[in-house]
Amino acid sequence: MVVDDHPMWRDAVARDLDEAGYDVVATAADGAQALRVVGAARPDVVVLDLQLPDASGVDVTRGLRAACPAARVLVLSASGEQQDVLDAVKAGAVGYLLKSAALPEFLDAVRRTADGDPVFTPGLAALVLGEFRRLATAPAAGGGDAPRLTERETEILRMVATGMSYKQIASRLVLSHRTVQNHVQNSLGKLHLHNRVELVRYAIEHGLADASEPGGPQ
């Protein structure tokens, strides 16, 4: 599903997706229309512009997640402002891509979003990671009762927060794919979360006051 208020841009994105073999089940010109049709359309991925005429894209992201929890939101925006990126992720967006992205990068982002991988334009991934690091060193709200992650779990979480895949993390840390997956699953269990996207969002929103800085490969 493609949501953008500019007809030429919306049609071009829908056409590119269609030519790449994706089934574009719906398009919408504003937030209200998107929220009306998402439940019936039941898209796997929503490509969403943040700048909509009737509502904040961040609010629309929350609404889309509530109306169709299975839909994964990929923001496609002209804005690279840090607050826009962080607000979108906190609202439930899986990824954030700038409109200046090349077509192969966009199509790859859609594919990865459908798989549940956090996806960010490279520079924006650094912003998300920087915010995570800031929160990780700040006192956690409500005291010191945050679940304790191991040093390795924290190290892998920070890599997940940049949008790295299990395969990339395994290669970087010289671990097996299964070992990385197990660490992520352990973190999800400790934090009572369901997927990697929620894991990144938790890191940004709450920080990990009890987690130490990750070291090199062990």
Image (cartoon, rainbow, N blue to C red):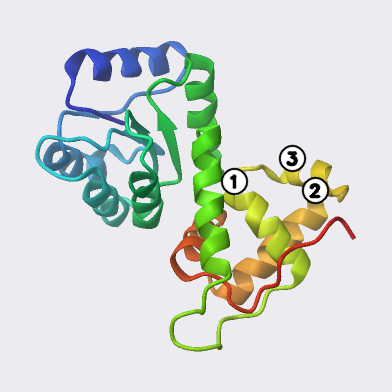
Numbered disc 2: secondary structure: helix
> Taking the image as drawn, is residue 116 in sight?
no
What residue is drawn where x is 75% and y is 46%?
Answer: 169
Measuring from the top left, give residue 140's x and y in whole percent.
50, 79
Furthest residue to the left? 54
Question: Which residue is the site of mark 3?
Answer: 168
Numbered disc 3: secondary structure: helix
Image vertical order of residue 208 relative to residue 30, above or below: below
Question: Which residue is the site of mark 2?
Answer: 177
Q: How many marks?
A: 3
Question: Which residue is the site of mark 1?
Answer: 162
* Amino acid marked by disc 1: Thr
Of residues 177 and 40, the one nearer the viewer is 177
How far apart are the two marked residues, 3 and 1, measured between alpha carbons? 11 Å
How far apart are the two marked residues, 1 and 2, measured between alpha carbons? 17 Å
Image vertical order of residue 29 relative to residue 175, above or below: above
Mark in the foreground, 3 or 1: 1
Measuring from the top left, give residue 70's x and y in whole percent.
40, 50
What residue is drawn where x is 16% and y is 29%?
Answer: 29
Dot 3 and dot 1 residues touching (CB under 8 Å): no
How far apart are the two marked residues, 3 and 2, measured between alpha carbons? 9 Å
Numbered disc 1: secondary structure: loop
Query: If you read the primary sequence from the N terminus, does the residue marked by circle 1 or circle 2 appear first?
Result: 1
> Taking the image as drawn, is residue 90 in sight?
yes
